[in-house]
Amino acid sequence: MSHSHSHDNASHISVKGYLVGFVLSVILTVIPFWMVMGGAFTKQATLIGIFALAVVQIVVQLKYFLHLDFSKEGKLNTFSFLFTGMVIVLLVGLSIWIIYSADALMMR
């Protein structure tokens, strides 16, 4: 009987975690929308705010939806994810750099 209870408790925690993540994601989406639609900030402040909130939203979604953390269980997944992200950033960044360099070297 106690085994069933512990399973139910784990299920409740994950649903609670998803709800917290969802609410935080909605809030982090509404704020930049309000910043743009309200027009109360300068263009630079709006862009910095949107970028900062986007980074926070990425962290929230990684923690609450992908369950990436530095606990003993989540460490391997976290490092795999970070390595994949680094490879993607390098691949895209270096590709753009190569394309622009090739364009600059082309005879016009």
Image (cartoon, grey):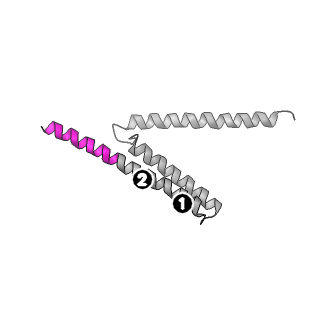
Return the residue nearer the eye: 8 or 86: 8
* Point 44% across, 50% down: residue: 25
* Point 41% across, 35% down: residue: 77
State left or right for residue 84 relative to residue 94.
Answer: left
Residue placed under numbered mark 2 in the picture: 24
Return the residue nearer the eye: 80 or 2: 2
Please provide the residue range marked out in magenta: 1-17
User: Which amino acid does the dot numbered 2 rest on?
Assistant: Leu
State left or right for residue 53 relative to residue 63.
Answer: right
Magenta segment, prevailing SS (helix, strand or loop)? helix
Tell me where residue 95 appears, x and y as whole percent. 67, 33
Q: Earlier in the sequence, mark 2 or mark 1?
A: 2
Q: Is residue 39 above or below residue 10?
A: below
Tell me where residue 43 appears, x and y as whole percent. 64, 60
Residue placed under numbered mark 1 in the picture: 34
SS of the residue under disc 2: helix
Q: Residue furthest right?
A: 108
